[in-house]
Image: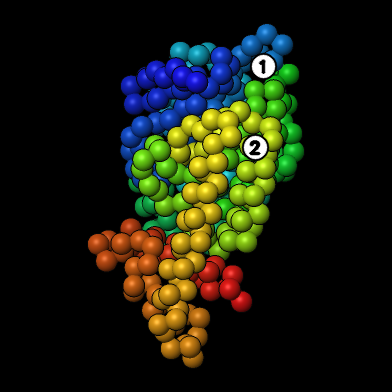
């Protein structure tokens, strides 16, 4: 099946169906400032205005989309990580009502909500988090409507089922459009930009992430996709068509591979070390991120994330 693609400047628009577009900002201004999402166009007997699902792109492109496709009544966010919250205020500014998983909605309203939700202050200062937010263009929203992951949202006659995929974060939600047969797995971990490229895979660099929950989420997503969906989309990966199980084998392989990396490093260590000493020792080995090449803000942030990835593996084995 050939999907029609078009561009508005730096934004790629793929017509998955006549009514649903995959929106991807090609070059984000910073590494953690954008996520791909879906725009559902208005249609007779469906939604009277467009609805946006987790399209976190720069404000100038939000305006360009509205100019091209008309007003957007509602915007649904999937979770409170920076690459999903930085530019949501732009959708509120053009008149959309913002919806977010309840326990992560604070991250959209104020930066304190972001650093409290993910224990950023364990890493160090508020200034580091502020610098990270500024780097990614974060601005807060004024008002957010919370929803419980797993509930079905209705916009006129459009049905959006939200699906809890909470291995990634406690409120992290995917979407299933039952009429359009599209599954959006958000940040579950399929981050290949194209079939040939590689990516990092599932990300679990905060205290709130869970490797065992990830495994269950991936199984549940695969079942849903194979049984009910014609298309799969995600926050940082390419469009997948019916019955292609690449995302699931990719994500499982990445998790398995990460476990082997940590296991091998652990075997080489003195078994009498306390957990903090083990983590510090493994951090020095740059198991996941090339921190030796980093300094300042990026070194602090990647060390913080990697320390949690290591801890999740250590505790997952017990
Ligand atoms: Zn995320």
Mark 2: few, some, or many residues within 10 Å (few <14, many ≥20)?
Answer: some
Residue 168 position, x and y percent, is: 57, 53
Between discs 2 and 1, the one toward the N terminus = 1
The image quarter in which residue 8 lies = top left
Left or right, 136 with respect to 171, comes to left
Q: CA distance from mark 2 to mark 1?
A: 27 Å
The residue under the point 46% across, 13% down is 68
Mark 1: few, some, or many residues within 10 Å (few <14, many ≥20)?
Answer: some
Q: Residue furthest bottom?
A: 272
The residue under the point 39% across, 51% down is 132
Mark number, residue 173: none
Q: Residue furthest left?
A: 293
Closest to the observer: 101 or 252? 252
The residue under the point 37% across, 67% down is 287
Closest to the observer: 21 or 219? 219
Residue 110 position, x and y percent, is: 53, 46
Decide: is 189 above or below 293. Answer: above
Left or right, 25 with respect to 173, comes to left
Identify the element where label 2 is drawn. helix
Identify residue for label 1.
Answer: 47
Decide: is 67 above or below 126. Answer: above
Identify the element where label 1 is drawn. loop
- Location of the C terminus by quadrant is bottom right
Residue 97 position, x and y percent, is: 62, 28
User: From the Cβ of disc 2, is ligand 1 less than 8 Å away?
Assistant: no
User: From the Cβ of disc 1, is ligand 1 less than 8 Å away?
Assistant: no
Mark number, residue 226: 2
Closest to the observer: 159 or 99? 159
Left or right, 165 with respect to 292, comes to right
The image's colour scheme reads rainbow
């Amino acid at each position: 099946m050939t999907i029609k693609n078009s561009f508005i400047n730096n934004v790629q628009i793929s017509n998955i169906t006549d009514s649903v577009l995959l929106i991807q900002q090609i070059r984000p201004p910073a590494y953690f400032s954008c996520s791909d999402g879906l725009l559902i166009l208005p249609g007779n007997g469906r939604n009277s205005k467009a609805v946006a699902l987790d399209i976190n792109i720069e404000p100038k492109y939000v305006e360009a989309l509205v100019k091209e496709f008309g007003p957007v009544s509602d915007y649904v966010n999937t979770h409170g990580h920076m690459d999903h919250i930085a530019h949501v205020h732009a959708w509120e500014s053009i008149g959309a009502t913002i919806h977010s998983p309840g326990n992560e909605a604070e991250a959209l309203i104020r930066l304190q909500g972001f650093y409290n939700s993910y224990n950023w202050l364990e890493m160090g200062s508020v200034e580091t988090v502020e610098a990270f937010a500024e780097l990614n263009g974060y601005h807060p929203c004024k008002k957010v409507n919370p929803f419980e992951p797993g509930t079905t949202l209705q916009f006129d006659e459009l049905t959006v089922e939200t699906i809890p995929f909470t291995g990634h974060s406690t409120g992290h939600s995917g979407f299933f459009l039952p009429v359009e047969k599209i599954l959006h797995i958000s940040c579950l971990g399929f981050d290949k930009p194209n079939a040939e490229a590689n990516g990092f895979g599932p990300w679990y660099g905060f205290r709130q992430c869970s490797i065992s929950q990830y495994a269950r989420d991936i199984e549940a997503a695969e079942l849903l996709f194979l049984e009910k969906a014609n298309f799969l989309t995600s926050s940082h990966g390419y469009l997948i068509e019916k019955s292609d199980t690449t995302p699931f084998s990719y994500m499982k392989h990445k998790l398995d591979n990460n476990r082997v990396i940590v296991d091998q490093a652990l075997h080489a260590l003195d078994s009498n070390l306390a957990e903090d000493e083990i983590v510090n020792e493994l951090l020095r080995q740059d198991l996941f991120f090339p921190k030796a090449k980093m300094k300042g803000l990026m070194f602090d942030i990647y060390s913080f994330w990697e320390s949690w990835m290591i801890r999740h593996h250590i505790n997952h084995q017990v």
